[in-house]
Image (spheres, rainbow, N blue to C red):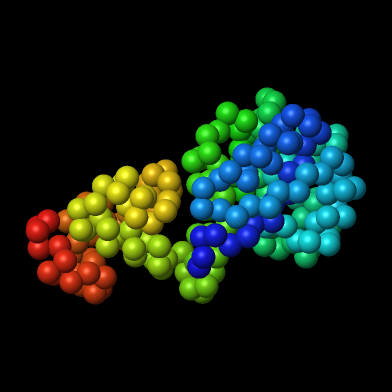
Amino acid sequence: MNNNRSLNIVVAEASVIIRCGLSVVLKRLPNMDVHPVEVTSAEALSNYANMHQPDVIIINPTFDGGFNPTVFKAAHACLGQTRYVALLSSVITNNQLKEYDDHFSICDELDVIASKLYNLTHIQEEEAEKGNDAETLSQREKEIITCVVKGMTNKAIADKLYLSIHTVITHRRNIARKLQIHSPAGLTIYAIVNKLVELSDIKDNL
């Protein structure tokens, strides 16, 4: 899958400062082609969602008197692949967040926002292309294993694959969970057995 595929993201927030500021931030995310659309009312959100089926809706849980993802999803069945992200600009309880797929805070750095969007869209689609098998490694995870067994640092891997360090760390955590392998030596054996690398590629690191 292409990292740079276009993402259609709706920003639903009453505050013009927060709404416009987040749109600017989204456009600056590295290795992502994000097209944010700003909406200021529940009616505008509903109309846009029906017409364009956005990839992600970033919304203040208090938007337009209170937003309920469950009710919205039921009223917009066509948005089966849309992900809902709570935009935290005020005090929100965990109970209000439980229906969301993730959340952003106005204090989040670019890498954190990029990583969350990546995990919500990119990784999910990679796994869907492989039959939604949660325990199947994605192509990106295989690339990272190859880099790890060659002795590359997280920073070097991030630079090579055009990812943030935070995203590389997230991938490594997912790899460890899926394979139940928690050491470079274990990953090396896995990579050789599964023909991800040749022995000659890693002999200097053994």
**Residue 135 location (% of width, % of height):** 41, 65
Q: Is residue 126 visible?
A: yes
> Is 22 on the left-hand or right-hand side of 122?
right
The residue shown at (56%, 53%) is 32
Tell me if residue 15 comes above or below residue 55 in the rendering: above
Tell me if residue 129 comes above or below residue 171 in the rendering: below
The residue shown at (34%, 55%) is 160
Q: Is residue 172 visible?
A: no
**Residue 139 location (% of width, % of height):** 40, 67
Q: Quadrant of the C terminus?
A: bottom left
**Residue 201 location (% of width, % of height):** 16, 66
Tell me if residue 159 comes above or below residue 79 in the rendering: above
> Is 143 on the left-hand or right-hand side of 184?
right
> Is 79 on the left-hand or right-hand side of 43?
left
The residue shown at (22%, 69%) is 197
Q: Quadrant of residue 121?
A: bottom right
Q: Residue furthest right?
A: 43
The residue shown at (32%, 45%) is 155
**Residue 20 location (% of width, % of height):** 73, 36
